[in-house]
Image: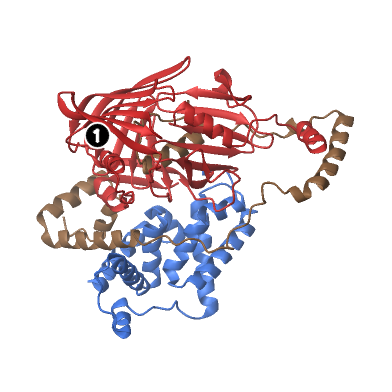
Chain colours: A blue, B red, C brown
């Protein structure tokens, strides 16, 4: 999509819906919350498109997504739930570590999701926008309204903190 | 707009496993091996269909999971889910967000294999049969599995397309350290329904994507050949097709352009326009076209006439 | 140079200038601590990037109109007949009145090339770039 055209709402929904949903899921760790949030974002996009003028479309879209997330979290007055780290959960269920590769992969995903959720919000957002959504540092800076140096620091420290937790 | 700096490190990170499901049969294994090999080669590819003939030289490099092809029209590169093309120095990238596994149709079987030499290397001459009739002749390098010569045959046994390497060096090559790729498009799956068939003349509809603002892209493959069908509400003949060869299938008229590696077909149906592009041989193409929405005149009055009088 | 810290992630993400990149690489050659940090951060980054993309749950996207609805064919016929009569009466060809531009072959060529390139299965050769 070029920056010069204003896409239709349907087009935005089809092109970005899945990415928005995955962004929301990685930030919240909860499918229902991610669903509600994505719906809210798409509604705001629909309203916003009427007044949107060609510019940096992705920057605009992710600002809307981010604001919707922050508003929603504030509205619910609770932080996203943090699932038990997988190690604890499997101990609780009495499951022995399995050699099955597929199972191992699922567990690893859960551990990574837990490590993401354990990050302070600003750090988590920077890591998810970079590694799940695929934005550049400049775009993340524009989305979050902070200097690029701050983005660089958040991403690096976020990854380092996750590593501590995963090690 | 997103930009990506592609370096060897980044490539290692974005590479996803796209291995085909393990297939017991030799042919599937052989084709798999050919796509994994690392090498550098230069060659010529030529396509002939009736009076239409087109040829090009090319250079291909495959290393570290990255493929680069340089031809007369520019360069193309693939790594992970990103395909980038360059025709004027800058790289422009398209990200394919998902794609289905590679599956080889069971209509193909291995025919005879005989030892030969090519470019001074030990090779095996292999024939691939399509429901018992020769479809592909290949000279496959014994060490790497790379086809040094490939001939795609039409139904009458004539050569439709030939690709021959004139130089070949196995092993990894140097790739540019960093490539600045401007990401211009994302090919997103289209959950919408499409009326294009799920399978057509032995080809499976592997993926359906959104294309541009108003069109649908359906990708079909039988594991050996593949093609895309674009379904668009737009009218009018694209300029490139003004000089195209007109041909008929079951009394319906289509226009085709032949390039060294692909055939392009355009037609208008009463309520949609279609473009097909792919590397499938002519007899397969004819079968496919008969199963897709048929050409017919567009226009309001024609539709009205049909609605009133059938 | 001092330990590059944040620049290590920026290096992984292709966010450094050529000069910065050179400096960081030079530093990494001589500093085992930063090499470890680089590897650790890279492993985390890879792990997050490899998290599976979830499918959109049904119902979140706008539903496209079905391509053909035979039930409505008759109603459509009558409406169309009226419109055609009006068009004939005032001498305007509706069919070509607001036709958009022909399909954009370059975009389609790019889509086809990209899809073939990312998962070619078997392809004799892929020399074509762009529309014919």
Q: Which residue lies furthest to the front in this view?
A: B132
Q: In this view, does A30 lie above or below B194?
A: below
**Position in image of residue C28 (x %, y %):** 15, 54
- What residue is shown at x 35% (from left), y 35% (from top)? C123
A117 relative to C90 in the view: left or right: left
Q: Can residue C85 be seen in this snapshot?
A: yes
Q: Name the residue under label 1.
A: B146
Q: Residue at x 40, y 71 (%)?
A: A121
Relative to the observer, which residue lies in front, A38 or B119?
B119
Please state if B87 lies on the left or on the right of C38 as rendered. Answer: right
Instruction: Residue at the far right: name it.
Output: C89
User: Is B288 placed left or right of C51 in the picture?
Assistant: right
**Chain designation of label 1:** B
Residue depicted at x 49% and y 52%:
A58
Q: Where is residue B57 in the image (x, y as percent from the top left)?
A: 32, 22
Element type where label 1 sits in the image: loop
Question: How many other residues sit within 10 Å of disc 1, few (<14), some (14-19) or many (≥20)?
Answer: many
Q: Which quadrant would residue B230 be assigned to in this image?
A: top right
Residue at the spot 30% in from the left edge and 38% down from the top edge: B67
Front position in the image: B103 or B108:
B108
Q: Can residue A145 be seen in this view?
A: no
Figure check: B34 above or below A137? above
Q: Position of residue B262 (x, y in %)?
A: 44, 28
- Determine whether A83 is above or below A6 in the image: below
Q: Which residue lies furthest to the top in this view?
A: B51
From the viewer's perspective, is residue C54 above or below residue B275? below
Number of numbered discs: 1
Q: Residue A16: x percent and y percent?
A: 51, 55
């Amino acid at each position: 999509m070029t920056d010069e055209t204003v896409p239709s709402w349907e087009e935005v929904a089809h092109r970005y819906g899945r990415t928005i949903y995955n962004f929301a899921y990685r930030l919240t760790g909860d499918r229902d919350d991610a669903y509600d949030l994505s719906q809210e974002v798409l509604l705001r996009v629909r309203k916003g498109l009427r007044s949107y003028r060609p510019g940096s479309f992705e920057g605009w879209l992710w600002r809307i997504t981010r604001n919707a997330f922050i508003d929603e979290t504030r509205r619910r007055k609770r932080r996203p739930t943090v699932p038990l780290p997988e190690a604890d959960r499997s101990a609780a269920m009495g499951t022995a570590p399995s050699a099955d590769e597929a199972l191992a992969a699922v567990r690893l995903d859960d551990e990574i999701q837990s490590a993401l959720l354990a990050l302070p919000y600003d750090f988590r957002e920077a890591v998810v926008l970079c590694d799940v959504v695929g934005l550049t540092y400049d775009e993340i800076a524009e989305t979050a309204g902070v200097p690029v140096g701050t983005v660089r620091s958040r991403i690096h420290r976020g990854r380092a903190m996750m590593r501590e937790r995963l090690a | 707009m997103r930009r990506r700096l592609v370096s060897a490190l980044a490539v290692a990170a974005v590479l996803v496993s796209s291995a085909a499901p393990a297939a017991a049969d030799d042919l599937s294994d052989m084709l798999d091996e050919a796509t994994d090999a690392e090498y550098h080669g230069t060659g010529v590819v030529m396509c002939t269909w009736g009076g239409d003939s087109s040829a090009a030289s090319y250079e291909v490099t495959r290393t570290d999971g990255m493929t680069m092809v340089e031809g007369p029209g520019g360069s193309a590169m693939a790594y992970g889910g990103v395909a980038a093309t360059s025709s004027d120095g800058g790289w422009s990238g398209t990200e394919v967000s998902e794609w289905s596994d590679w599956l080889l149709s069971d209509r193909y079987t291995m025919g005879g294999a005989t030892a030969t030499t090519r470019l001074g290397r030990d090779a095996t001459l292999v024939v691939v049969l399509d429901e018992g009739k020769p479809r592909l002749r290949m000279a496959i390098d014994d060490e790497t599995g790379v086809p040094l010569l490939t001939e795609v045959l039409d139904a009458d046994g004539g050569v439709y397309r030939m690709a021959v390497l004139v130089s070949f060096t196995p092993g990894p090559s140097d790739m540019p350290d960093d490539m600045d790729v401007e990401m211009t498009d994302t090919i997103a799956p289209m959950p919408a329904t499409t009326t294009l068939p799920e399978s057509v003349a032995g080809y499976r509809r592997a993926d359906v994507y959104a294309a541009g603002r108003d069109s649908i892209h359906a990708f079909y493959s039988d594991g050996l050949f593949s093609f895309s069908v674009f379904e668009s509400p737009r009218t009018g003949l694209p300029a490139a097709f003004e000089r195209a060869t007109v041909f008929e299938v079951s009394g319906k008229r289509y226009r085709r352009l032949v390039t060294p590696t692909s055939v392009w077909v355009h037609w208008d149906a009463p309520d949609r326009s279609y473009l097909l592009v792919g590397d499938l041989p002519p007899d397969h193409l004819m079968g496919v076209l008969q199963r897709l929405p048929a050409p017919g005149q567009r226009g309001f009055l024609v539709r009205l006439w049909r609605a009133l009088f059938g | 140079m001092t330990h590059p810290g944040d620049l290590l992630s920026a290096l992984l993400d292709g966010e450094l200038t050529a000069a910065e990149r050179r400096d960081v690489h030079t530093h990494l050659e001589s500093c085992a601590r930063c090499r470890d940090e680089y590897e650790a951060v890279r492993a985390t980054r890879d792990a997050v990037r490899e998290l599976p993309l979830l499918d959109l749950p049904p119902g979140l996207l706008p539903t496209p109109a079905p391509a053909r609805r035979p039930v409505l064919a008759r109603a459509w016929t009558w409406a169309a007949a009226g419109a055609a009569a009006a068009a004939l009466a005032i001498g305007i060809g509706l069919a070509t009145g607001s036709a958009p531009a022909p399909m954009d072959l370059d975009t389609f060529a790019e889509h086809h090339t990209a899809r073939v390139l990312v998962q070619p299965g078997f392809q004799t050769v892929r020399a074509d770039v762009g529309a014919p």
